[in-house]
Amino acid sequence: MPTASRLVAAVCFAVIAYFVSGLIPPLLPEGTQFGLFAYVNTALGVVLGWKITGSRTGEGMQTAIGAGLTTSLALVFWGLLVHSGVIMIENSTKMRYDGPMEAVVDTFNIGIEFAQIIATPMIIGTLVIGGIVAGILAELAGRRWA
């Protein structure tokens, strides 16, 4: 059911995801093609903000902050999974795997490699502070327009 808190959470996490997506390209090798990278992450932010943070408001500020941090963590997890899955599919179309199990295992290896690259204080701090602020804003919106 659409509520003000869900909308605020979705918008906040869309902004957070888009901003963090802008922090990642300098960390990767020059010439890396990003395509729809920022837009996919923004869409993930909308969906996860709506489903996770937006659904947990109205239970107090601590719960909202926890939900915001949970959503930030989920955003990282799903972002890594989606983007490493895309790279795995690209590699599989180039016949780089001997079988489907090798492709699935490589998806997680690629995700771990990306996680190590993006584990910088700037990105972690942005996700933590952004998650806390988004949780608080969603809670306040829920209280204001309940």
Image (cartoon, grey):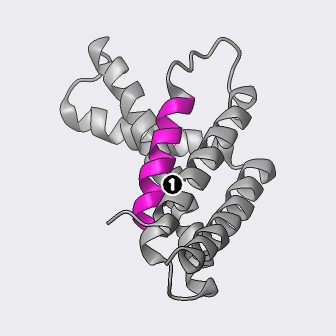
Q: Position of residue 98 (x, y in %)?
A: 23, 24
Q: Residue at x 41, y 26 (%)?
A: 87
Q: Residue at x 57, y 80 (%)?
A: 143
* Residue reaching furthest to the right: 122
The picture quadrant where one finds residue 69 is bottom right
Of residues 102 and 143, the one nearer the viewer is 143
Question: Is 40 inside the magenta-drawn segment?
Answer: yes
Of residues 125 and 51, the one nearer the viewer is 51
Callout 1 secondary element: helix
Residue on which disc 1 sits: 10
**Magenta segment:** 38-53
Q: Is residue 34 above or below residue 146?
A: above
Residue 36 shown left or right of residue 121 in the figure: left
Q: Position of residue 106 (x, y in %)?
A: 38, 36
Residue 115 shown left or right of residue 104 in the figure: right
Structural crowding at the residue carrying mark 1, measured as other residues with C-alpha within 10 Å and reported as few (<14), some (14–19) or many (≥20): many
> Could you tell me the amino acid type at mark 1?
Ala
Q: Position of residue 78 (x, y in %)?
A: 44, 49
Q: Is residue 29 above or below residue 122?
A: above
* Residue reaching furthest to the left: 99
Q: Residue at x 57, y 15 (%)?
A: 33
Question: Is 3 inside the magenta-drawn segment?
Answer: no
Q: Position of residue 79 (x, y in %)?
A: 48, 44
Magenta stretch secondary structure, dominant: helix
Residue 29 shown left or right of residue 99 in the figure: right
Is the N terminus in the top left, top right, bottom left or bottom right quadrant?
bottom left
